[in-house]
Amino acid sequence: MKYNFDEIIDRTNTNSMNVDGWRHYIFKDDPHREFPFADNEFIRMWVADMEFAVAPEIREAIKERVDRQILGYSAVTDPEYYEAVFEWCKTRYDLTFPKRHLVFSQGVVPALYQLVEDLVGAGEKVITFTPAYGYFLHACEYSGTGLLESPLASRSGRYEIDFDDLEKKAADPSARMLILCNPHNPTGTVWSREELERVAGIAARNGLWIISDEIHCDLLRTGLRHTPMANIMPDYDRLITCMSASKSFNLAGMMHSHIIIRNEEERARFRSRDKTGGALNPLSIAAHKAAYSRGAQWLDALRSYLDDNFRFTGEFLAENIPDAGFSVPDATYFAWVDFSKVLPDEKSLPLFFAERAGVLLEGGNELFVGNAEGCVRLNLAMPRAMLKTGLERMAGSVAH
Ligand SMILES: Cc1ncc(COP(=O)(O)O)c(C=O)c1O
C-alpha cells in the first residue's frame, strides 16, 4: 500500500480544534465540567476532519510553494488550477460549468453566511432537512432569518425525504431558499437521481433559491457516484453549488472552497461583499490544485480504507451493541447511530460518552438542529486501531 492510513499521528500542540476545541464546541466551555480522562486519553470522533496524514502529493505541493519564498496577497490566476478543477468535476461527476461561475471563498460556511444574508430577507425563511449540519442553522441565526425544518425519516436505516412535508414547507409564502446537503451530513444519504428531481421540481415551482452543499461529494463508498444538483437542473439560475477539497483531502484548516454561482447579479453581489477583497491563502491554492490534479489515487485508497472502517463498525455494533440502530451510509465518513433503545433516558449522549467512555462525539438536537434526539454521529476517519478502541470503550460504557 502506497499510503499508510494506519499511522497514528500526534496532533498535540498543532493548534488543532479537534484536539483542543471540543470543550468549547461540544460542552460550551462549561468551567465546572471535569472528565475522568486526561486530554490525551480521549478518542476523538467528533469534528469533521480526519486523523489521517494529508496526501504526500499535497504536502509536497505546499512545500514547493513555500520554497518560492514569498507569500504575498494571492488569488487564483493560474490557468492550470482551473483545468485541474474542471477535469476533476467532469471526470468524476460529469459536471461542467463556465469559469466565470466559479467564485472562491474561505470556506463553505462563510459562503453560506453570505448567501443567506444576500438572498433571504427579513421575515423570510430557509428550508433544510433535519437532522442537519449545525451551521445551516447558524447561517440563518447570523442574518436573523427563520429556518423551516423538514424532518427526514429513516426507512430501514436510510434517511429519506418526506416529500409531502417538503411540498408544504416550500409552499409557505415566507420560504425563500432550500439548503440541500448533497450528500447528506450527518446521515450519509446519497440522494438518488429521482429524489433530486423531485426536490428540484418542488423548489423550482416555488421559485426557491437552492444552495447545494456538496462538500462531501468525493466521499462516497467505493463504486457509488455522486450526482450534482447542477446536472439535475442544468438551466436553473437560482442554483448555487458549494464544493471544496477540504473534507475529501483533510485540508479543512486551509480555509478554501469553490462556490459556483450561476446568477450574474448574485455573483457580483457575493464578490462585492467579500470582506477579504477576494484575497486567498497561497498555500491553500497550491494544496487544492495538487488535490485535484494529483490526489485521485490517494482519495481512492482513502475511500477503500473508509469502506473497511464502516464494515468493521457495522459488525462491531451488531455484535456488541445490537440495539444500536445503524446501517452503513452511502457517503461521508460519519456513522449516524441511533442510541434511543440503548440509552433511552440519557439527556446528553455526548456527555455520557465523554464521561463514561472517553470518546468525544456529537449528537442530539443541540448539535444537529432537530430530529436528532437519541442519535450520535461518529467520525470514522481514523486508523482502525483507534476506531477499535473507541468502539470498545463505547460498548463497555453502555454495558454497565
Ligand atoms: C455539510 C457541510 N458543509 C460545510 C462544512 C464546512 O465547510 P468549510 O470548512 O468549508 O467552511 C462542513 C463541515 O463539516 C459540512 O459538513
Image (cartoon, grey):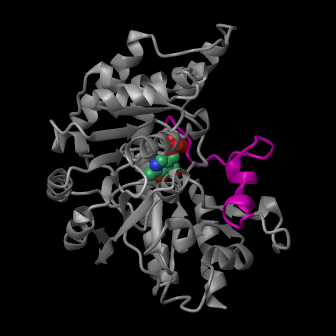
- Please identify the quadrant where the C terminus is shown: bottom right
Q: Position of residue 29 (x, y in %)?
A: 77, 63
Q: Main secondary structure of the magenta part?
A: loop
Q: Residue at x 66, y 76 (%)?
A: 353
Tell me: residue 352, above or below residue 210. Answer: below
Residue stretch rendered in magenta on the structure: 1-28
Q: Residue at x 56, y 26 (%)?
A: 284
Residue 309 shows in the view? no
Q: Position of residue 205 (x, y in %)?
A: 14, 54
Tell me: residue 295, above or below residue 159. Answer: above
User: How many marks do you count on the picture?
Assistant: 0
Answer with the quarter of the image where residue 189 lies.
bottom left
Tell me: residue 25, above or below residue 219. Answer: below
Answer with the quarter of the image where residue 203 lies.
bottom left
Front one among 228 and 73: 73
Q: Position of residue 99 (x, y in %)?
A: 31, 19
Give left or right: position of 253 versus 182: right
Front one among 279 and 358: 279
Q: Residue at x 25, y 37 (%)?
A: 93
Name of the residue lying farthest toward the front: 122
